[in-house]
Image (tube, coloured by chain):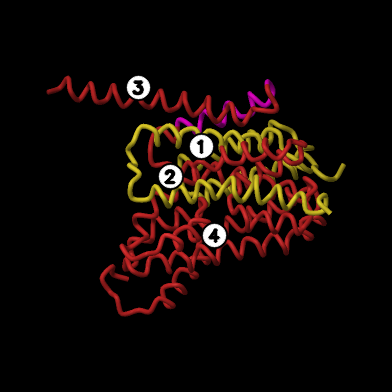
Chain colours: A red, B yellow
Amino acid sequence: MSPDSDDRSALSWFLTGMRGMLSLPALILMTSIVGFSAFALESGLTRAEAVFMSFAIWALPAQVILVGTMASGANIAACFLAVTLSSIRMMPMVASVVPEMRTKRTPTWLLLILSHFVAITAWVFAITTLRNVPRQHRAVYFAGFGVTLTTSGTLVVAIFYGIAASFPPLIAGVLFFLTPVYFNASIWASAGQPVVKLAFVMGVILGPLLALVTPEFDVLYAGIGGGTVAYLIDRWRRKRRRAEKGGVR
Amino acid sequence: MIDEYWTFIVIIVAGFLATDIWRWLGVVAGNRLNEESEALYWVRAVATSLVMAVTAKLIVFPNGSLAESPLWLRLAAAGIGFAVFLATGRRVAVGVAVPMALLLAGLWWTGFGNR
């Protein structure tokens, strides 16, 4: 696949994108979605609600937060705030992929539709493989992967919702563990900048601690507080590095 | 009538719109957004802390049957698993398989689910 080979049709690139489903990250995502369907069931969502949520949101952290806030009886505004704050990360994720995916002629409406399929797994897929695809076929290539991944994930919720219900406690418990463990590894592995790693550590420490202090706003405080502290430490670190470089001269 | 569809309305407003607004803004920002801007550093940090707070809470305060398991076991499985993940080249497969195996072994050893 050299970037200047242009003899293949759009359909063939769509199918190549679909083949990304056979990769390890896609498989892990499918299994952690099995974990989500068990979580949704245990939190009181119906099968139809869980399936609809999976396709409509397509971001596991946002889904987990929405299920959690709904289960705690929060009103729709509080749910919206908690979910939207957790989804801010979508903006830089999408924004960093779009320049690589579009040509001058790619219509904005197409990118708006394709953006829905961007979540952690598809984003990692995009930043690692888009460069191997001729530019004019990148959008259709990503669509092949993204649409297939989201559709498969939604089908997994539909199929495993009932099966997860009859799982013995040992299996259900282990599957529940898959989601946090997958986020631990994949978010750390895809963290390019030190500020993300600092923020990772702050969130892991502050989340459970603040849950004990302010169970209603723990995630919000941990995000804004931990993220701001991480940002300030990182800015201080970058400034000091610049100052050291300046001192050598 | 409204009660029947209320959960779907919540999912559309507080789920779909709350999430896709950021995806659409990401498209709009597209080329214009400077990856090195200070504001983006902060936004990224806040978003990462937020997601990790949720993730850590799932381990410390899980829902469902995992809530019956001892906290030390979940912390040890996640902690040791993450350490192995860091030490072996940060492969996601390792970072998932090791803590899962440790949890499974620990649950089996403590007789989880048989009580």
Q: Residues within 10 Å of mark 4 (few under 14, many from 20)?
A: some
The kind of residue tagged 1 is: Ala
Identify the residue shown where x is 45% and y is 72%.
A14
The residue that label 3 is drawn on is A236
Q: Front-most of B86 and A166? A: A166
Image coordinates for residue A19, horizontal then vertical, percent: 49, 70
The residue that label 4 is drawn on is A26
Left or right, residue B113 beside residue A104: right
Residues at badges 2 and 3 in contact (C-beta under 8 Å)?
Answer: no
The residue that label 1 is drawn on is B47
Q: Residues within 10 Å of mark 3 (few under 14, many from 20)?
A: few
Q: Chain of mark 2?
A: A
Examine the structure image and report whether residue B112 is included in the region drawn in magenta: no
Q: Secondary structure at mark 1?
A: helix
Identify the mark nearer the N-term, 2 or 3.
Answer: 2
Q: Secondary structure at mark 3?
A: helix
For the N terminus of chain A, which image quadrant? bottom left
Mark 4, mark 3: which one is toward the viewer? 3
Mark 1, mark 3: which one is toward the viewer? 1
Q: Secondary structure at mark 2?
A: helix
Identify the mark nearer the N-term, 2 or 4.
Answer: 4
Image coordinates for residue A204, horizontal then vertical, percent: 57, 31
Label 2 in the same subunit as label 3: yes
The kind of residue tagged 4 is: Ala
The residue that label 2 is drawn on is A92
Q: Residues within 10 Å of mark 1 (few under 14, many from 20)?
A: many
